[in-house]
Image (tube, grey):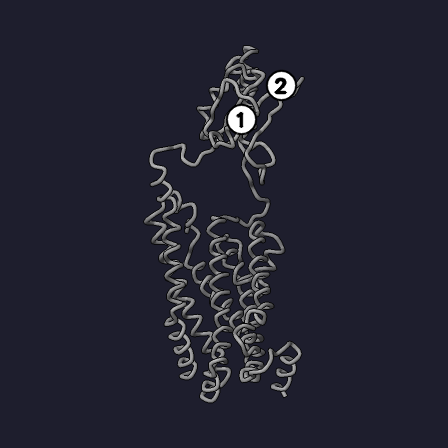
Amino acid sequence: MKDLLLVASYTFQDLIKRKSFLISNMIILIIMIIGFNVPNIIRGIKGNDESFGKAKLAIIDQDNVYEGTLENLTQREEEIGYIIEIPEAMTVEEAKEKINQEEIDEAVFITREENTIHINYLVKSLGMMREVPQNLITILQESYKNLQIAKFNITQEQLMVLNMPFDMEVNQAEEKEVGGNILAMMLLSIVLFYAIYFYAYQVSTSITTEKTSKIIETLVTSTSPRTIVLGKTLGIGLVGVLQTIVLVVVAIICANLFLTSEMVSAVLDMSNMTGMLAMITIVYYILGYSLFALLYALTGSTVAKPEDIQSANGPVAILAVIGFYLSYFTMMNPTSSLNNFAAIFPISSPFCMPFRVMMGIATMPEILISLAVLLVTIAIVAQVSIKIYSSAILNYGSRINLKDMIKMYKNKND
């Protein structure tokens, strides 16, 4: 136990004292503070100009389809999302010239062709714009309909019947209630993934670096390979917990200082954050980190040069990404069988199960089964990693391939 804490303490201090670690954290914190201040920066540039950032749209009724009533659209600019200009007359060529000179951003030409109203939508460059914005079409159709209704001398009561609003609501057939802020859940899943992946990756980098500097030879003669692997995993994990706490605290402080209450409630809605969820999240963070850290310890011991570590870590990185996306995309249908599988599958459960707990759909048996599967997987990976690590750690030759690792594991068992 003493040796384990000694290795963990050395790893912890070595990592937090590195200039690269300190500088990268400072950069992350600065970017975070600036990012939370973006709305304030925009408001400072914008001032009281409500039209800031809005595109200018010219609407030209060439065949007088709307009989001079298009001026009413200027009162609905917020709804349309444009600054509306209604020129008395303008040709397509004139509109193109104005767009190229940035006097306007877009133009709409309305003409009547037999029993069809044709809309020619003119933009500077198509890019991803392939059709007229749907909200503009809806408002133009509504304005035309109201114009025609007015001609028929329809009473207010009849007009209300024609424009009867539809009240929509969505209900679920399952008895199990599903709720929560989906954005907050996705952010939680992303934070968990990067925290687990980034710090687990550091384990392989640390092992390879020490092999290069020959420090590992001193460690091997002083303590067992098992203690080295677990000590490094513990030391880097503590750094990860510390850094994650700092970043989350700074993010919450910045959100409350620089964002409006509406923005904070929309993005950082913690109404579903309970003691149970906090405990589950911490447990899965620790176990998820342990699983991938042990896998990276294995890959780190199989290479002798730092430049080879990225290719060696490739398979583990692919596993981590598969696990994350398996949980991330099943959030869209949290009651699906695939989401149930992702909550139990060990490479995805650290990212998926906290989400299910936040949604209120995870049962205690599901949580216990998921934890049991994850713990068994960690135990198996730890056994394999430590045995191969103890044989491969002093290898300074070429990279050890899968066949060699299997042979090393068998020899250790013998």
Judging by the rendered image, the residue that carries numbered circle 1 is 95
Q: Quadrant of the C terminus?
A: bottom right
**Residue 68 location in percent, x, y?**
51, 15
Q: Residue at x 53, y 69 (%)?
A: 292
Q: Is residue 263 left or right of residue 334?
A: left
Tell me the amino acid under the disc marked 1. Answer: Ala
Task: Tell us which disc is closer to us: 1 or 2.
Answer: 1
Element marked by disc 2: strand
Q: Is residue 20 left or right of residue 182?
A: left
Q: Mark 1 and mark 2: span between their CA atoms?
A: 19 Å
Q: Is residue 266 above or below residue 247?
A: above
Q: Is residue 310 above or below residue 187?
A: below
Judging by the rendered image, the residue that carries numbered circle 2 is 112
Question: In the displayed image of the protein, which residue is found farthest to the left?
Answer: 257
Front residue of this view, candidates 37 and 294 = 37
Tell me the amino acid under the disc marked 2. Answer: Arg
Q: Is residue 153 above or below residue 338?
A: above
Asked if one can make out residue 12 in the rendered structure from this viewpoint, the answer is yes
Q: Quadrant of the N terminus?
A: bottom left
**Residue 30 location in percent, x, y?**
37, 56
Front residue of this view, candidates 169 and 196 = 196
Element marked by disc 1: helix
Q: Residues within 10 Å of mark 2 (few under 14, many from 20)?
A: some
